[in-house]
Amino acid sequence: MSSMRLKIDINSDVGESFGNFKVGHDAEIMPYLSSANVACGFHAGDPVIMERTLKLAKRHKVKVGAHPGLPDLVGFGRRSMSLSREEVQNLVIYQVGALLAFAKAVGIDVQHVKPHGALYNAGAHDEAYAKPIVEAVHAVNPDLVLFTLAGSKMAEIAAKAGLRVAHEVFADRAYNPDGSLVSRNRAGAIVEDAAAVSRRAIKMVKERMVNTVDSQALVKFDKLHTICVHGDTVNAVELVKALRKAFAAANVEVSPVSTFV
Amino acid sequence: MSSMRLKIDINSDVGESFGNFKVGHDAEIMPYLSSANVACGFHAGDPVIMERTLKLAKRHKVKVGAHPGLPDLVGFGRRSMSLSREEVQNLVIYQVGALLAFAKAVGIDVQHVKPHGALYNAGAHDEAYAKPIVEAVHAVNPDLVLFTLAGSKMAEIAAKAGLRVAHEVFADRAYNPDGSLVSRNRAGAIVEDAAAVSRRAIKMVKERMVNTVDSQALVKFDKLHTICVHGDTVNAVELVKALRKAFAAANVEVSPVSTFV
Amino acid sequence: MSSMRLKIDINSDVGESFGNFKVGHDAEIMPYLSSANVACGFHAGDPVIMERTLKLAKRHKVKVGAHPGLPDLVGFGRRSMSLSREEVQNLVIYQVGALLAFAKAVGIDVQHVKPHGALYNAGAHDEAYAKPIVEAVHAVNPDLVLFTLAGSKMAEIAAKAGLRVAHEVFADRAYNPDGSLVSRNRAGAIVEDAAAVSRRAIKMVKERMVNTVDSQALVKFDKLHTICVHGDTVNAVELVKALRKAFAAANVEVSPVSTFV
Amino acid sequence: MSSMRLKIDINSDVGESFGNFKVGHDAEIMPYLSSANVACGFHAGDPVIMERTLKLAKRHKVKVGAHPGLPDLVGFGRRSMSLSREEVQNLVIYQVGALLAFAKAVGIDVQHVKPHGALYNAGAHDEAYAKPIVEAVHAVNPDLVLFTLAGSKMAEIAAKAGLRVAHEVFADRAYNPDGSLVSRNRAGAIVEDAAAVSRRAIKMVKERMVNTVDSQALVKFDKLHTICVHGDTVNAVELVKALRKAFAAANVEVSPVSTFV
């Protein structure tokens, strides 16, 4: 019964270079993704990089999404900032709009929106960020899929607002018992071993759970649609290849999230 | 015969504040405009300002356009920069896209694109800027009207590419004999007297000509659709009121440029 | 006994324009200050503005200080950001250094450092911000006076580190019972009436206390050296004139803080 | 006669990372330099990077200089901009001042100033840029050595103003017959072969000449004190090692420029 076959989307952040400043390995990683989150100029990315990244995604038939971040280039959008709802809503509209225009120019569709870094984390847990993010996406295009931390408050808010939601897990990031990600500043926050990442990914997809950072407990996921590999980790290309192989061996189908949420 | 009645569009730059930094008198000037050029975040404007500006325009039923500028906030986009065609094209796509998203969110259409400052001037005269600007607008939405200096090279290039073009004149700026604007750095570059501005405007619209800065010659315009009042001049509101009055007295109809180009 | 005469420093933030974006009324307010806090380019100010502001201060023989802010121009440095100690320390060194160079070029000394906005507030109460701010000032020039909220933790830390400290009060801002400032987002946070501001200022200086926002309690100050008038409030010039008059009438001497701390 | 031994300074641009964005190989290249040009935050570099870079230079006893650039992060300061003299002078003062403060904090001296990219090129040839650069350096500290293109107009202007000047050559950049550098946009502008770079360097230092890009002519240098290896070329570390070896073999002494200009 093919309908019973498990499906998963593999996403990664791309287009995070900025002018002369190179980040990531977009050309190498793109062929292994089903969804690509494209930086939109606030935490990373610039107009030239955005256009080139969309052309690259088009070449590999990878679905793209906007990856809006906080206005903090030097902090790479990873430092939390105290913003008003009006500020949050409009910085999302702005960045998603910019990406939509490049998609139009390049001749592809935009599939999704995934907030970046501190905006992602704030959105996952804090209504004051989640609501304006959801409203922004809805206002620009209610057909866009919103990526958010699996089981987060934002997933609820987005679903209530009528958005399609992709519940996301991180095979290369350690989890706290409450389902949040261990902060990047703490040791063990990032898992780099390809075999470990693959094992975690398979367990996540097949059993809908992951061990917490201290292995004392399990985080369980009610829904799980997409798995992220961070494009700026040293061995990101290796990780995404390992994931592809592990999913194939486990008979899990890799497919863009919009085809099954 | 109503079809013989002269028509003119009055445009002004709005939304040029930035966070806590206030520029212009948008609320006061908006009611007198037929078209408003909205800054898009590179030379001025920010996401919150953009949304508020579009709501203001909507309230007054003023048509809006994107007003993309060079990435030079401290220079207000008025300092020429040496950019590649790829850079020019993509910074226009980016900024127009951002505005389109706000227009969608606010529930209005975008009528036009008017490049700002040094980008406007470079585009008017230099093919290396004009072509990527035209291509950018065409790629995002070929129905957008492109504002450019009356009689400029960009007008030609845009028309050839199939874009609707609004030939623009400046009632408050002095002209060189070749039809270019006198640099802001030179004395007499800006005309602030409301009566003088009105007289010039009427002559421009009725006779399609204007005296040059040294009054030794006339600049003639083959086509002329829109007249600009700079929103950041001290008495911008007075000027635009004077223009409205002068056009009414001269039986010139003020109308958004998209209705007659 | 002249030594018994009360002394107070009047300070205000200046140089907070940015390129074409004008903020404040520096030329009007400068003559009434004894100390001027000069924005250093991160939350406001740019190199040209900085040099002009120092020349203006020199002309009026007003002592200047660096006014470093968070790297958040669109938020005017008023949005709290989560920064590492290394980031805080170095952004202070950077901005103070820039101002020192302009002071050298213009031929004046720098008297003090006053952190701006969210950096000021974080520094006042949070050791993780106070310590790197103090270390930065000490590392660049241990003779600089550090301005901080009267009675704050940073005052203690700075004194322990051997810095001269100016305990600061705000005549135009409402106080919480714990001595912190009422957030700008709340009604009643800012006092604009000149008579009220003067009354508060006199009570602060003479009695070392101020009523809290709800008038249920008093905030008392052990030490108090400088009083701030915000340069970007509408009637800042009026306020500072009123303060000068009130202090003269009350026989309080207005003098740069470095002459008496 | 040891006094006859030829001396040369080897300089490279360092500290050109920005937050999460890594550029260059500072740790690898630093040990081979005698002078390091430290980015100051406008075209590259940020406060944290600046402090770390100075500590690295201190560890290797490498002399440091400020490397101020145009305010164009996305263009890496390589796109020419039309700036006023006041703007040029003050952006140099600002950036040099920031570096001086870090040097003070870290406990080293600043040896020199080398303008970056488009500012370097504009300064070399255009008095409207050269004069305010020279005045800025002079105003901040007249003991600083100014690096400029060997034989350029800025060298003359700086010497007349009383600054010590380091005439600079580029072993890894092709020359036009007039002594200017071939634009980076043109093929052959950059020489990457280590043997070729070494041969060119030895000829430059020993014979004070270099073949032009078309090899039809020679550029001759009256004075020549420092040779640059670009830190962001792929094989920068290889090049600088090759230079060290070639100079040792040719009995040319590598020494910080301040020891002999």
Image: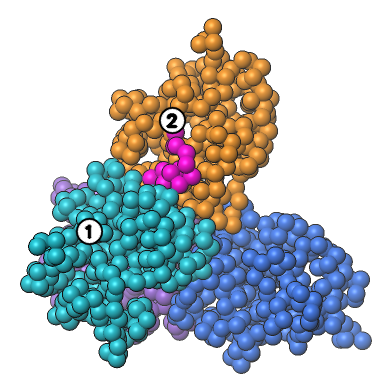
Chain colours: A blue, B purple, C cyan, D orange
Q: Look at label 2 and name its amino acid.
A: Thr
| Residue designated by label 1 | C260
Q: Which residue is more in the foreground, D174 or C159?
A: C159
Q: Residue A166 at what x, y percent from top left? A: 69, 81
Q: Which residue is more in the foreground, D140 or B150?
A: D140
Q: Main secondary structure of the magenta part?
A: helix
Indicate yes or no whether the magenta region holds residue D109: yes
Distance CA(mark 2)–CA(mark 1): 47 Å
Q: Quadrant of the C terminus of chain A?
A: bottom right
Which contiguous range is marked in magenta?
D97-111
Q: Residue B225 at what x, y percent from top left? A: 31, 67
Please give left or right for residue C217 compared with residue C136 in the image. Answer: left
Q: Look at label 1 and name its amino acid.
A: Phe
Residue B63 visible in image: no
Q: Identify the secondary structure beneath mark 2.
A: strand
Q: Residue A55 at what x, y percent from top left? A: 65, 61
Please give left or right for residue B63 compared with residue D176 in the image. Answer: left
Q: Chain of mark 1?
A: C
Which mark is drawn over residue D148?
2
| Residue in view at x 50 percent, y 31 percent | D181
Q: Quadrant of the N terminus of chain A?
A: bottom right
Residue A124, by quadrant, is bottom right
